[in-house]
Every structure is written in structure tokens, then in C-alpha cells.
Image (spheres, rainbow, N blue to C red):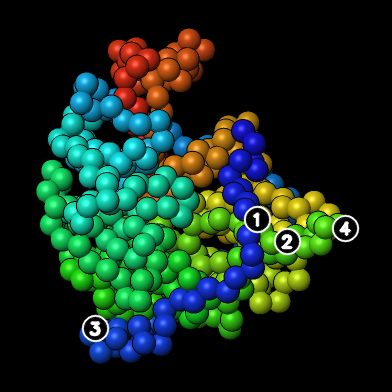
Amino acid sequence: MNKMKFIFLTVLACTLFTGCSNSSKKAASDSSETAAAVSEPTSVPTLDLRQTSYPKSDETYEETVKFIPLETRDDVLVAQRRRIVYFSDNKIVMAADNGGIFVFDGQGKILSHFNHQGQGPEEYLYLNMNVYGTVTIYDEVTREIFVMEQIGRCQVYSEDGKYLRTFHFPKSKQYREAYSFDRESLLALDKNIDTDSAYVLISKKDGSVLSCIDIPLQKRRADVRKVPLGKWGVTSSRIYTQHLHKEGNDFILSELSSDTIYRFTSDKRLIPILALTPSKQESETPIVFQVFKTTEKCVIGWKYVFDFDTNGIKATPVIYDLEKRQAFGGDNGKGVESFICGITTSMRHNALPANLYILNEFPDRILDWIEKGMLEGKIKEVAEKLDPDDNPVIQVIKVK
């Protein structure tokens, strides 16, 4: 699998972004408490990004637990481009780029589905599967579905598709990553990330900012880099990364300008789990570590080195073992590199239980695995019942 597959570049004008504004901070302080202060552990492990290579691990990090075939009916056909936005033992919520939203039970049986794509006041314009497209969120407590559009608006529906309400964000703010935090609020990352408070808690009722989560920073660095074009001059390029994801009941904050990766807990504690060196405030050659998965044992991601004068962008898969306090990379013959690639594909704006990641595959690929002798036991028994034209199959993978 091509490592560069997960690097998304675009040519654009270098633009500065604005984050949680002073007025938003004032509104937050007037309406609710701010997030708790940083909880400092006794010692934070450090990942040295200056290393040009990392040793191979002797461990196997993943194990497929089960396959969940999603029910196929004439009125329940999932589009080619789709994303699982929520997964638990008893519920699976999927959004597709044709506007369809599907709710399945934990065994893959359809519970409800709807498509409200359109231009009416109770509809959403589209469900964009791009990295920074429409954000679809499922609230497991209230069983509400939020569709956060990139026009500063959020449409809210019941689980069976009944329209409930619409709210707009302050000053048409745009949130590119968001999750249900508690009964009252969503945790979101503002699309504009050059101020001190990109992470905010916003109201599920009216979209107002309830509080801002301040990540300790000296200054923010733009994620746009200059790219020399020889005689044609200079343009700019951005690496699209995920700065926020949910792990069980907690959230991982990995803002690109921060030298530390944090865990934000359900009781609003901000806990540093991994420090990065060299400091992004000091490094001449920008180095980015993008987190895709964390467990109690490890932090998994990709290291990107920007060096457009020579090689452009170099990508390296890295697993940092928190128990051994050591970084590992490359393929050890046990599928470590493909494991990281799989997590990269899986972790796009979805809420998952701790220590799991999921892939959704079309049946023809799984049937091909059977022909190649890659499956056995109960997983094979499930796979053998598939039809090539069925809906996707959820592959549940445990991270050891």
C-alpha cells in the first residue's frame, strides 16, 4: 500500500485562519465554566521525530475480532463512498455521499434510514465524504443525528429521520471535526486554527460556544507550507490531518502546532500522553506527527517531514509503545505497516470504543480473501454467506 496515499495535497493561496475569537471566549466565560487545567503526569514519554528510521517491533498489534455484514434490501443500498460515524456493540451509524444516513443494530440489521439531501429549510445540502467535508454526529444518549454543514449551519434529526431543529454557529464559524461530548454539548475543532482556542464545546441546542479548551502554545504554525516551483516561482501546499478523534469515552487532541498530544477526558481533564521533539516552535524543517489511534499501550500514526527543496514530503508509519517508551516503525513481517495503513483509512471522523478500529469493505474483496486462504474459523463461515452485490461488511479489529 502506497504510504503517500494518505497525504492529501492541494495547491492554494497561503491564508491565515482565525480560531476561537475573543468574543467567543467572552461568551464562553459568561455562559459556562471553561475546561479544567492541564493535569500533569509525573513523566511524559517523548517521541523523537528527528530519527530517520525506527526499529521493527517483534509484536503483532492487531487481531480481527469479527465481521458484521450489513443488511441488504432494495431500499437499503449503501453508496460506494461512505463513512461509519458511530460504532458500538448495539449500534452502527453510517453516512454516504449520496445523502443517505443508515442506522443498523450491532448485528447489522437495519433499524432506520433516511435521505434529506436538498435545498429546503429542513434539509442538508449534501454529505461530503472529504476529509474536511460535512460532519455527521450520532448522540447515543438522545438518539439524535447532527449534520454539521460547511455553511455555518447544523441540522438535527431523530434516529428515524424526523426533523427536529436547525441552529447556526456564531459568525458563521465552521467546524471540521466534532463529536458528541455530553448531553448538552459537542466537542469541536474550529476550521480556523491559528488562535489559542481551536477546541471548543458548543451547545447542542443553539450552537453557542459554551467553553474553549486552551492547549498550551507559544504560537501557532500554519499547516500551509511553501512549495518551490523553480522558474514558475512559489506556491503553497497543505497536508490535511485530523486534529481530534474519540477513543472510548475520551478524546485525543493533537493540534499541529502543539508539541504535546493530549487526552481530554469526559470530566474535562486535559492530560498529556506524549511529547514530541524537536519543538515545532524551533524546527526549521517542519515535521508533523499525525495521530490516528491511541490505546492504553500505544500511540499510532504517521510522521510527515516537509522538505520541498529535496524530497517534498516523506511519510513514515510509527507506533510509539507507551509501556516500553520506544518508537517502532516499518513492517516486521506481521503486518505492522498495513495495520497502520488500515487505521489511517478507518479513522476519519468516527466515534469508536476503546482499543478497536473498524474497516468497512465490500463483499467482493472479502470473497477474494477466502479464495486466497486468508480467512478461517467463524470469520470465514460468515464471509462464505456473502453475495458480491451485498452492502458493505464491517471488519472489527482489536488493537492489542
Q: Which residue is mark 4?
A: 231
Quick check: marks 4 and 2 in contact, CB under 8 Å? Answer: no
Alpha carbons under labels 4 and 2: distance apart: 12 Å
Q: Which residue is mark 3?
A: 32
Secondary structure category for the residue under label 1: loop
Q: Is tag 3's residue or tag 4's residue first in the polypeptide sequence? A: 3
Q: Which residue is mark 1?
A: 11
Query: Label 4 sits on what residue type?
Result: Lys
Q: Which residue is mark 2?
A: 235
Q: Quadrant of residue 170?
A: bottom left
Task: Give the number of the mark in front: 2 or 3.
Answer: 2
Of residues 149 and 44, the one nearer the viewer is 149
Query: For mark 4, does the 10 Å Cα neighbourhood hold few (<14), some (14 to 19), or many (20 or more) residues?
Result: few
Of residues 117 and 114, the one nearer the viewer is 117
Query: For mark 3, does the 10 Å Cα neighbourhood hold few (<14), some (14 to 19), or many (20 or more) residues?
Result: few
Left or right: where does residue 20 sit relative to residue 146? right
Residue 213: where, in percent of width, then height? 39, 77
